Amino acid sequence: MYGITKPISIAGPNKPDLYRNAELEKFLVDLGLNESKDETTKREEVLGRIDQIVKGWVKQLTRQRGYTDQMVEEANAVIFTFGSYRLGVHGPGADIDTLCVGPSYVNREEDFFIILHDILAEMEEVTELQPVPDAHVPVMKFKFQGISIDLLYASISLLVVPEDLDISNGSVLFEVDEQTVRSLNGCRVADQILKLVPNVEHFRTTLRCLKFWAKRRGVYSNVTGFLGGVNWALLVARVCQLYPNAIPSMLVSRFFRVYTQWRWPNPVMLCSIEEDDLGFPVWDPRKNPWDRFHLMPIITPAYPCMNSSYNVSISTLRVMTEQFLSGNRICEEIELNKAQWSALFEPYLFFEAYKNYLQVDIVAVDAADLLAWKGWVESRLRQLTLKIERDTNGMLQCHPYPNEYIDASKQCPHCAFFMGLQRKEGVTGQEGQQFDIRGTVDEFRQEINMYVFWKPGMDIYVSHVRRRQLPGFVFPDGYKRSRPSRHNNQHASKTSEDVARSQSGSAERPGKRKNDCEMEDLKPEKPKKQAFFSPLRQQSVSPSSSASRSVASLASSCECVKLGCSTIGDIGSNCEDVASNSEVRSSSGKLDSEKDGSGRWHAAW
């Protein structure tokens, strides 16, 4: 028996299943999801080169710290892979998740993130080097000969790391901190998954298929609050356990059938949760109150067992549930010969699904700054979703979209993310009800601006846009369709137009001061884009800096701020309560917002 329960069915394929499986595998081959032999060879060469580099790095540190010649000779570091590469489901251009395991005297904070970083920075083969030491799992990101690498580091309690180290053995966790445990567990989880599925090749084909589907439907992103690679792998592995003799075409169909009916927050587990004398916390809602708040628990199979999907929110779970239902309907049609496999992989038409969106523009002076700044902002976007859910009591639903978009017409490096907005379905709004999320956005903005590696020119702008106002750069052809065709698997609430909004601006130049803001009611026939501008820091604007001027161009409307509100179903009504002095710019260039005694903004957005 595989897994913690008996299989749902042990039936194998019949002739129609075999035919559909052949069609599916042909479809996947035609898509080009498999990399070429040349690329496979190049990846192996790159991994070999990285292995040489980290071995030399550890020997160098061993020598510098006065260890004996014999210790220098024996000093070692070992490279492991995990994620899609280890599971055998990576595609062309995919990154390689790698882990470097080193001895106890080589640490992460200085030796890895400073000394090894500097070694890599001097190498011509290395580009786009980006250390992320404060991440939940600290990582160094870079490209080596054009191949993307995510490199983690784990220092284990051994003076000499053996070349044949068994990372699945629990002894590697002895006397290490929780960050090291998280770093090690990527490899340990991947190994366990491959051991716990009935048929590895069927698992791989099914996972490759479902990952592609998730990306096409906009639900592949752990950082945004959806699911990442390990989450999809665990979901697919559980279905493989429940149908041990099924082939990929059957497993894809059963995947949607199972998770359409799954009663969250019941956890998905490949094996029972094990305790250990090492004392690391494991996922257990009976003992850990915080675990009770997890909405879609997907538990890792290696000790210490954790919830790999803690980022999922009410809004993202709703979106994924809708997509599971859509996938299940299409698979039922495929089984009835009423649809082809291509129908399952139709891209999600996000920009036709909602009437209201939040647009988050991210800018910086140069590409290197944008890479770091974008990584920080993207890692915090999930918090904006959670804050909106919190401040509207779940009445305003958010759909964060994981794809990023670039406006090539901008003079400064730029990218943008979008969120769909709608009123919670089945709930009728009270007359004149508004969603005031200005304070929510302001709180989010302030958190973003706490970035410890902030540099002049790094800025963020959050705007509310209607569907007909969407910028052309989000559409493949550079313009939106004149008569958008609504996809039958997407829908937006009729009442989603009553999102009320406002704007707050930032001082574009230090010392510039505006005490009063004019009022303007938004008319439905003349929609205008309104923005929440981030408070610029005084040193970010230099009259001599052309890059700063290009950043400033995004905020040109900030010179004469107009504060308005639009409401769903009653655009322009109830604007009387908007305070005319709702914002004051301080001489430092930061935004001081006028609030009532409760600390809330006066106006609805």
Image (cartoon, rainbow, N blue to C red):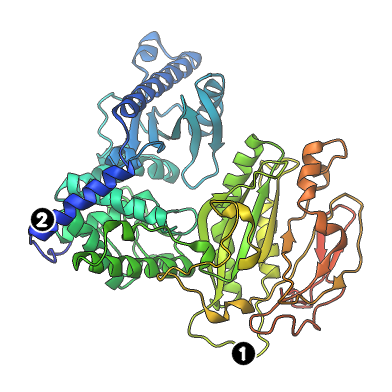
Image quadrant containing the C terminus: bottom right
Q: Check the image and name the residue furthest to the bottom.
A: 431
- On the image, the x and y values in percent for residue 52 come to 39, 18
C-alpha separation, residue under disc 1 versus residue under disc 2: 54 Å
**In front of the other: 521 or 372:** 521
**The quarter of the displayed image where residue 496 is located:** bottom right
Task: Indicate the position of residue 158 as horizontal and vertical percent values.
Answer: 34, 28
Q: Secondary structure at mark 2?
A: loop
Q: State whether residue 302 appears in this view.
A: no
Specify whether residue 135 is in view: yes
Q: Considering only vertical position in the picture, is 207 above or below 176?
A: below
Identify the residue at horizontal 59%, vertical 51% (top origin): 478
Rendered position, 10 above or below 423: above
Q: Quadrant of residue 417?
A: bottom right
326 is higher (above) or lower (below) than 578: above
Which amino acid, by three-letter code, is at mark 2? Asn
Residue placed at 47% from the left, 62% from the top?
349
In the picture, measured across the screen, residue 346 lies left or right of residue 255, that is: right
Q: Nearer the viewer, residue 358 or 244?
A: 358
Reading the image, the residue beneath label 2 is: 245
User: As rendered, which of 267 and 109 lies closer to the eye?
Assistant: 267
**Crowding at mark 2 (Cα within 10 Å: few <14, some 14-19, many 20+):** some
- Residue 130: give x, y in percent of width and height: 55, 35
Number of numbered discs present? 2
Q: Which numbered circle lies on residue 430?
A: 1
Under mark 1, the amino acid is Gln
Report x, y in % for residue 421.
57, 70
Q: Earlier in the sequence, mark 1 or mark 2?
A: 2
As helix, strand or loop, the secondary structure at mark 1 comes to loop
Quadrant where the image shows the N terminus? bottom left
- Residue at image location 13% in from the left, 58% down from the top: 17
